[in-house]
Image (tube, rainbow, N blue to C red):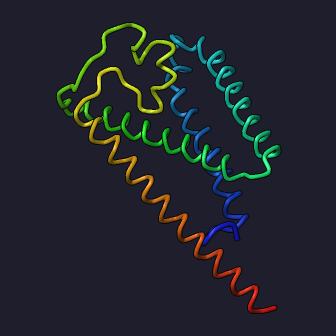
Amino acid sequence: MLGEDVTQRELWFNVAWNIWREVAEIGAFLIPFFLDDKGAEAIPLSGIVGLLVGLFCGALIYAASMLLKDKRKLCIFLAVITGWLSVGLFTGGCHEIEEAVGETPKAWKITADFWSKSKFPMALFKPFGYTSSPTILWLVCLPVWAIILVTLHVIKYQKVKNNSEKVAKAGTEQV
């Protein structure tokens, strides 16, 4: 058992299924570009760049997991990055809904080109929740989702820790 309720086989299935789902989703989103010749030229280049970035990040994670003796720091780092991405994607999704139904007032707006969420370098931080003009909804969603995420992570960590202690205790009692 890997955790409280996840086997190695279930983990492999979940990873494979999610990779397949994401690839299929990307394919579905690209259908309009393939049907309309406008913008289709950028698809191969952006695909190659995305592939290279993904392979580079994957190689770094693999190398770190092989080189580090204590994997806790790597786990914490990856959990923070993934959680940060989750918060950013959640707030971005809430903002998209907000644009469709009506925006709440903007808290502030930074107008300098460097800080624009649609221009390099700040566009790199947009998936992590960056915006140069946050709305009130964005300011509420970001900490609320972060608190929910951390709370659920702590609960799961405690359950796995308690289960590991029970397994270790059962193992010593059998000896």
Is 7 positioned to the left or the right of 141 in the image? right
Q: Residue 137's quadrant in the figure?
A: top left
42 or 96, which lies in front? 96
Left or right, 94 with respect to 160, comes to: left
Image spot of residue 59 (x, y percent)? 77, 35
Above or below, 117 against 138 in this view is: above
Q: Residue furthest bottom?
A: 174
Quadrant in which the N terminus appears:
bottom right
Q: Residue at x 35, y 40 (%)?
A: 142
Position of 57 compared to 33: left or right?
right
> In the picture shown, does residue 162 fall above or below 102?
below
Q: As displayed, is residue 127 above or below residue 124?
A: below
Taking the spot 43% from the left edge, 36% from the top edge, the residue there is 88
Residue drawn where x is 28% and y is 36% of the image = 139
Q: Position of residue 57 (x, y in %)?
A: 69, 33
Residue 46 against residue 59 in the figure, above or below: above
Residue in view at x 31 percent, y 42 percent: 141
